[in-house]
Amino acid sequence: MMSPERVKVVVIGAGQAGLSVAYYLRRFELAADEDFVMLDRAPGPGGAWQHRWSSLRLGTAHRVNDLPGMADLGLSFDTADRSLPAKQVVADYYGRFEQHFDLRVRRPMNVRSVENAGIDLLVRYEDLAPQPIEEQKARGLFRRRKTFEEPPAPAAPQHEIAAQFLVNATGTWGSPFVPYYPGMADFAGRHVHTSDYVEAEDFRDQHVVVVGGGTSAIGFMLELEDVAAGLTWVSRRPIDWLDRQELDLEGASAAVALQDEAARSGRTLPSIVSGTGVPRSRRIAAGIERGLLVARPMFDRIEADRVVWDGDDGGMARADAIIWATGFRPELRHLAPLKLREKAGGVTVGQGASWNDPRIFLAGYGPQASTIGASRAGRMIARQIMAML
């Protein structure tokens, strides 16, 4: 068996956190494909933004901060065209960033596992790009047929790479969270998570229940107002409306502190909005005034065509679709062989580094989850790696 490729650093994920780390590694004169390798599962640049719905604009989403070094390209999200879909703008800017700094991101590559291999870490990943039929046959990439009639299923080419250090920057988009409620399996309509949402027109003339207390849920309510036949908004906690247009530094700092405390203690990370509240922009204030953005308490159960509240108040709301804007969890399944997860449900992380394995860094985890936090973390993580090389 051939020895695996070997580099100093593997960075998993080419979103805001991964690109930030890679930028600083290049500043320290590490070369892509020689000293470090970037692996990204997505088909193109843009991180999680490339998967978001087309109607989302930069002006209506959380602020997207510039990556470090983006000014060298004459680019800034503050001056970007806000008439274009945010996914398009971010993908364009990130792609130009990758090319300018010669990051040589390998995609689409799906990391299956990271394992201990002596002093090194062994990263196993597969190439998700379609392979020409003749090349598949030549490399023996067809699996054996289960039946005579069943067509052969091509297997993705498998690869291994050994590294001294690993930076996990996979974010959360690939790990959507949907809480369980009685009757979910009996629902005759559609369950749609934020990650599955494409456009409001998909819900034309339907009765829709939107679940969640953050900006995504609010955005869905505003988009669906003139499209759906009926709209019901429910939240697991009361909405903390803030009497200002944007989140201020004090509110952001408080949320970061809560995330940092949870990460350092190995607990499950709290949601960002639970620590910040929701700024009452003009668009949101207008929605509140006309009675659209008034959240009901969480329902108790789901039936075939409705959600139901038990208790003294009771009540029901018809539902053809339930949109679960209930957030995401860190995508860490591929790190399971390293046994980093604590009994409290999280991974113990401080200053971007795993406290259980000094070879592992988690960029964009916990307090680094915002675009500005990810940029700062990139510099911090790159400095720690260089100090140990």
Image: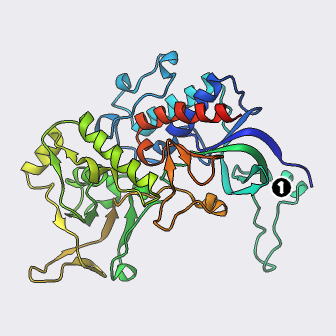
In-front residue for pair 193/133: 193
Q: Quadrant of the C terminus?
A: top right
* Residue pictured at 92% horizontal, 55% vertical: 1
* Residue pictured at 77% horizontal, 47% vertical: 161
| 242 on left or right of 153 | left
In-front residue for pair 86/358: 358
Residue 256 vs 217, above or below: the answer is above
In-front residue for pair 6/144: 6
Q: Secondary structure at mark 1?
A: helix
Q: Residues within 10 Å of mark 1 (few under 14, many from 20)?
A: some
In-front residue for pair 328/120: 120
* Residue pictured at 16% horizontal, 66% vertical: 296
**Residue 199 x %, y %:** 36, 52
**Residue 291 x %, y %:** 9, 55
**Residue 301 x %, y %:** 27, 80
Q: Which residue is mark 1?
A: 136
